[in-house]
Amino acid sequence: MAHFAQIDENNIVVQVIVVADEHETNGSEWCHNLLGGTWIQTSYNNNIRKNYAAIGCAYDPVRDEFVTSQPHASWSLDSNNDWQAPTPKPEGDYRWDESTLSWVEFPPPPPVG
């Protein structure tokens, strides 16, 4: 099975569908003829176009790849179309805290017993 993403006029993914293997070769055209709109193949295992297309993510036509949704307002895209925090993530188990714009260490697991 092949997956195809429909993008709107702003290159935002509005839906993703599964297409039978016999339509994969001309899938974009097949989807357009059946449903209208602009369709681009995506790969569930990220083999093509960098990321699997999800509703709300963007398609970069220059790089011919899908860009995941921005995880936090303070993050920006780097030259590889990957989201980066304002500061690098430290080693270990950390999560991003948007309110303080910093990495916060995960609390240790509760003691067993």
Image: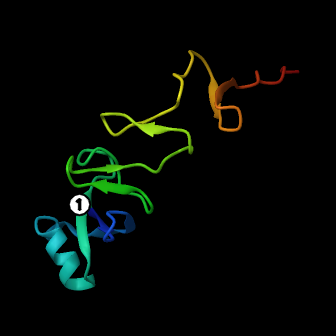
In x, y percent, where is residue 56?
Answer: 45, 61
> Taking 17 as reference, is 83 left or right?
right
Residue tagged by mark 1?
41
Above or below, comparing residue 44 to residue 110 in the picture: below
Quarter of the picture containing the N terminus is bottom left
Please, which colouring scheme is shown? rainbow
Residue shown at 17% from the left, 77% from the top: 30
Residue 104 placement, left or right of 20: right
Residue at position x 33%, y 52% in the image: 44
Nearest the camera: 4 or 10?
10
Who is closer to the viewer here, 56 or 113? 56
Q: In which quarter of the image is the C terminus?
A: top right
The amino acid on which the numbered mark 1 sits, given as a three-letter code, is Gln
- Residue 111 position in % (x across, y down): 84, 20
Position of 41 with respect to 74 (left or right) is: left
Residue farthest along the left direction in this orientation:
25
Relative image position of residue 103 (x, y in whole percent): 64, 26
**Residue lying furthest top:** 91
- Residue 13 image-quadrant placement: bottom left
